[in-house]
Image (spheres, rainbow, N blue to C red):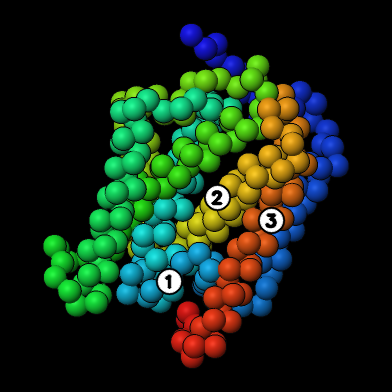
């Protein structure tokens, strides 16, 4: 049986090294620059995340006269990642890198299948072909939340296996059993209710949460490649030793998000398609 490892997110000494200062500075500076840009939060967030989502207004949740930067399905995916990450941190699952059981893997795969089926049904309706049921944004949000769980577990497992030394990680799976999903689904239900209310004061915190989740997802995936390309796999014994690769991954992630958004705007301009508004 694997021994329970202590969760060490913070170093024993509070002093930060240069990589940690740089990482924190980039996060704080980027957020401040984004907030200080002289456009509305809705316009800025729609533009920043345009490359990751079609942002169809009819598929989006509006809070008053403004909407979230993602459509309902992508709101669910990135909201699901954020909820799952918070849940795993709260449960002390950092550095868990075990492969899920067959049963859990099937459940996580079914989450993706549910999103694919709902997306196909919506697509058939959009092209005026026979479809099974009337698509709803609430169902798009639910299937997105479930898929976000699967994506978060994959990223969590990737970092646990690639980044940390064997002595500093456990082979226990991120989610060990079906009952383990119960509290997590409760967190998802809370997120669903917050979005479903469409209460206008919630738009700003939800928008910022989705922005941070998008950066975390793309940079988290990039982190695995940065570690492998730098031949640093299995070398970290503490979280702070990941500060250097994480800083590079953060820059790569932001660059990818900016490049995809810019490319989409250019393509839409070339094709004469309307930009998000």
Please state which of the two labelled residues, at mark 1 or mark 3, is closer to the viewer.
Answer: 3
In percent of width and height, residue 268 lies at 51, 83
Q: Which residue is mark 3?
A: 252
Q: Residue at x 36, y 33 (%)?
A: 105
Whether residue 192 is visible: no
Q: CA distance from mark 2 to mark 1?
A: 18 Å
Q: Return the x and y of residue 67 as percentages of the image width and height.
A: 42, 70
Left or right? Give the position of 141 relative to 53.
left
- Judge the density around disc 2: few (<14), some (14-19), many (≥20) Cα neighbours within 10 Å: some
Q: Secondary structure at mark 3?
A: helix
Quarter of the view holding residue 199:
bottom left
Location of mark 1 (residue): 55
Whether label 3 touches label 2, CB < 8 Å: no
As rendered, which of 62 and 175 lies closer to the eye?
Answer: 175
Helix, strand or loop status at disc 1: loop
Mark 3 / mark 2, whichever is N-terminal: 2
**Residue 211: image tag:** none
Say which residue label 2 marks. Answer: 217
């Amino acid at each position: 049986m694997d021994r329970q490892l202590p969760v060490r997110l913070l170093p024993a000494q509070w002093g930060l090294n240069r990589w940690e200062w740089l990482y924190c500075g980039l996060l704080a500076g980027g957020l401040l620059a984004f907030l200080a840009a002289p456009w509305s939060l809705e316009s800025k967030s729609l533009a920043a995340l345009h490359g990751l989502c079609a942002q169809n207004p009819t598929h989006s949740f509006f809070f008053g006269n403004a909407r979230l930067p993602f459509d309902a399905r992508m709101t669910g995916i990135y909201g699901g990642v954020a909820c799952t990450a918070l849940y795993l941190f709260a449960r002390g699952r950092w550095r868990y890198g075990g492969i899920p059981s067959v049963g859990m893997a099937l459940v996580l795969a079914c989450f993706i299948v549910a999103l694919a089926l709902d997306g196909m049904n919506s697509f058939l309706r959009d092209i005026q072909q026979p479809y099974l049921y009337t698509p709803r944004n609430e169902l798009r949000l639910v299937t997105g939340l479930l898929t976000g769980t699967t994506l978060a577990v994959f990223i969590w497992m990737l970092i646990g296996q690639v980044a940390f030394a064997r002595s500093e990680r456990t082979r226990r799976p991120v989610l060990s059993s079906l009952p383990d999903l119960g509290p997590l689904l409760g967190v998802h239900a809370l997120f669903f209710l917050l979005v479903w209310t469409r209460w206008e004061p919630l738009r700003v915190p939800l928008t910022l949460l989705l922005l941070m989740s998008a950066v975390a997802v793309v940079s988290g995936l990039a982190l695995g490649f940065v570690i492998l390309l730098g031949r640093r796999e299995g070398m970290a014994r503490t979280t702070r030793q990941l500060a250097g690769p994480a800083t590079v991954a953060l820059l790569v992630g932001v660059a990818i998000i900016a490049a995809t958004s810019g490319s989409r705007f250019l393509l839409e301009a070339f094709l004469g398609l309307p930009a998000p508004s």
